[in-house]
Amino acid sequence: MSDGKLVCVTGASGYIASWIVKFLLQRGYTVRATVRNPNDHKKVEHLLKLEGASERLQLFKADLLAENSFDSIVEGCHAVFHTASPFLLNVKDPQADLIDPAVNGTLNVLKSCVKSPSVKRVVLTSSVAAVAYNERPKSPEVVVDETWFSNPDYCRELELWYLLSKTLAEDAAWKFAKENNLDLVSVNPAMVVGPLLQAELNTSAAAILNLINGSFSLSIKLLLCCNEILSFVWIWVTSHDVSQTESNSIAFSISSDIEKGNKK
């Protein structure tokens, strides 16, 4: 058990983040969870209902694009789980809607972390989108590590703005971490589906629903990109696999590593 160690989860009302909060609470952590509006009952109700939430969950309002917004929140925290980043496939203004919140938001959180000596590790929820689209060979003997990133120019050419935002955000995070001697772990999940903790459908769950009702479609650009670079379109796993494997690997095993002081 964690003996009540204090941790922070950004974007806590999101799909993956909600599972991280759930597992951290189960392991005895005290969680500071940032959300856009702690008073928005529909967005935070599922968090407040989690086991241990009444004793060890604290909700905070934070703005990704506001410098110093996370300073007081991460102060005293043992670790920070940064998940807050927009997941949008269709946007009118890619820079304002996706890239700025992803890149600047990540850097703002990391800047707050280096100000707090208590923060021993930052866990960044990135995406397979940040590493898969680089036209490098992916044979079994090839090791994919933090030096791998999707090709930003290729993403721009095909207007794959979400992929670009995740690529630039993780790249910026690793550079900042190395320059500031910050212990950073990046987790790069693929299409995450499974049980929902929140009442509203998230993007990946909505995609499943759209497959069932026949309204799902992929853009020609995305199909071309997937066929050329990845040789497949989507990888789907069952809800049981996601809830027991994805959520555990992002929250449960990582929190165990924090206790042991290991680096993944």
Image (spheres, rainbow, N blue to C red):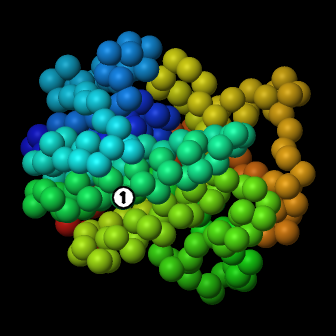
Count all numbered tags in the image, as a single digit. Answer: 1
Q: In the image, what residue occupies the spot 25% across and 27% down? A: 59
User: Considering only vertical position in the picture, is 29 above or below 249?
Assistant: above
Q: Is residue 187 left or right of residue 26?
A: right
> Does residue 67 show up?
yes
Percent position of residue 215, x then y: 86, 28
Q: Is residue 165 left or right of residue 223?
A: left
Quadrant housing the N terminus: top left
Q: In the image, what residue occupies the spot 70% across and 39% down? A: 92
Q: Which residue is mark 1?
A: 107
User: Considering only vertical position in the picture, is 84 above or below 25?
Assistant: below
Most distant residue in the top direction: 41
Q: In the image, what residue occupies the spot 54% across and 42% down? A: 86
Percent position of residue 84, x then y: 43, 43
Camera-side residue of 59 and 257? 59
Camera-side residue of 43 and 155? 155
Percent position of residue 202, x then y: 59, 30
User: Which amino acid is tagged 1?
Assistant: Leu
> Does residue 23 show up?
no
Quadrant housing the C terminus: bottom left
Give the crowd class for mark 1: few <14, some 14-19, many >=20 residues within 10 Å. many
Camera-side residue of 151 and 216? 151
Q: Is residue 131 left or right of residue 176?
A: right
Percent position of residue 19, x then y: 41, 37
